[in-house]
Image: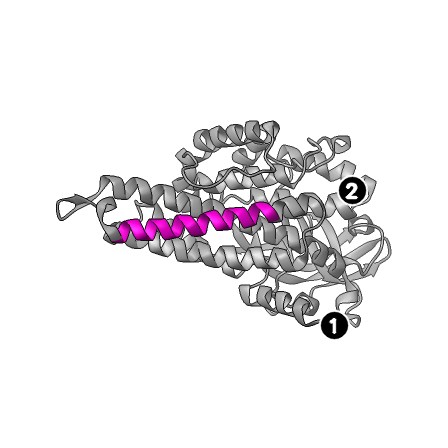
Amino acid sequence: MPNLFLPRSAWMDDELVMLEDSCRQFYERECVPHYEEWEALGAFSRDLWLKAGEMGLLGAEVPEAYGGLGGTFAHDAVIAYQGNLAGIDGWGGGLHNSIVIPYIIHYGTDDQKQRLLPRMISGDLIGAIAMTEPCAGSDLQNIRTTAIKDGDHYKISGSKTFITNGALANLVIIAAKTDPQAGGRGISMFLVETDGLDGFRRGRNLDKLGMKSNDTSELFFDEMRVPASALLGSEEGKGFIQMMEQLPQERLLIAVYAVARIERALNETLAYVKERSAFGHKIAEFQNTQFVLAECVTEATIAKTFLDACIADHLEGKLTTEKASMAKYWLTDLQSRIIDRCLQLFGGYGVMAEYPLERMYRDNRIERIYAGTNEIMKLVIARSLLKD
């Protein structure tokens, strides 16, 4: 679907434009025809992950030394934006690319990078990150999963919930307490390959509002033994710092999702109101419709401009936690408002499953909650203003 409204990103270059075109063709060819099937199944197919790997849509940020393109977040932003613009909202490729892989790039040992990154690029390994627990969401310092050193192994015990890619992932980064008495300073991260691993269990693929094709699962660890080499990096107790350092990119990724979906909602709505008639006139001819569209497109243009500024900052290593929090909360809030207003223009058809706004209305709701609720984002911003 063409970009009808929003400004071209200043950080786009010729290589990224080519990637954009390749992504658009891939999603239209390989995903759109099967998406309803994956929604019904509750997960994408593993074949799709392998095809994405063949197309170079996995691990674009991985350095060439480890088999990657040596790209930046700009590459992952294009891949994620085009997926959401095409309506492939449930695919967990964004988490795999922009959240899981960077942990290994930034903190992994050379052996971990050599062993894991090429298989993540190919799609043989599907990544997930297991932070959230039944009693610990945004308050990550209070996780209860433990990793106790046992000779040249660790024994990991505990459970995680709401884990994206949880039903398919076979490489899970697990946040666990290596020193339960040390609060955040006692958290470490572990790179766990789950295939055939004793003590690892998947719970149910959770039935949730929206994002039906995005497998979201419970994970259980019953004295699960992993080698000491599974510790991310070479030192215990660095997990909380690692998570805090990576959260800005995670929140920026969600902002990318939000603006792409805003654009899609407006594209779909404009096409609908130009075709649909009521009282002998096209819906687009009514002043109310025109005012709603004018307001939404103005807000979307502001949103895209802000998102581009955040991405530009991030590419220069200047994106602050506070600014990423602003982008995450404000753009996901705006997404909800615009999708709601667009659905209203569809009338009764807006809540029918065969029309796109029904699914968009459901799918967007979680984005104000995960990666830290929008209320937490406001606290982060406010604390930065009030500190001495």
Which residue position is annotated with label 2?
Answer: 112
Q: Is residue 119 shown left or right of residue 51? A: right
The magenta segment: 288-309
Q: Position of residue 316 (x, y in %)?
A: 71, 44
Quick one: label 2 or label 1, which is nearer the N terminus?
Answer: 2
User: Does the magenta segment cover residue 366?
Assistant: no
Secondary structure found at label 1: loop
What number is the disc on residue 73?
none
Q: Is the magenta region chiefly helix, strand or loop?
A: helix
The quadrant in which the N terminus is found is: top left
- Please tell me which residue is depicted at 62% across the width and 45% down the height of the picture: 311
The quadrant in which the C terminus is found is: bottom right
Question: For mark 1, does the 10 Å Cα neighbourhood hold few (<14), some (14 to 19), or many (20 or more) residues?
Answer: few
Q: Name the colour scheme.
A: one colour
Res 165 seen here: no
Of residue 10 and residue 341, the one placed in the foreground of this image is 10
Q: Nearer the viewer, mark 2 or mark 1?
A: 1
- Please tell me which residue is depicted at 76% across the width and 46% down the height of the picture: 106
Which residue position is annotated with label 1?
Answer: 388
Say which amino acid is labelled 2: Gln
Q: Position of residue 41 (x, y in %)?
A: 43, 45
Question: For mark 2, does the 10 Å Cα neighbourhood hold few (<14), some (14 to 19), or many (20 or more) residues?
Answer: some
Say which amino acid is labelled 1: Asp
Residue lying furthest left in this view? 280
- Please tell me which residue is depicted at 76% across the width and 52% down the height of the picture: 226
- Please tell me which residue is depicted at 48% across the width and 43% down the height of the picture: 84
Q: How many marks?
A: 2
Q: Position of residue 117 (x, y in %)?
A: 71, 38
| Disc 2 from disc 1: Cα separation | 40 Å
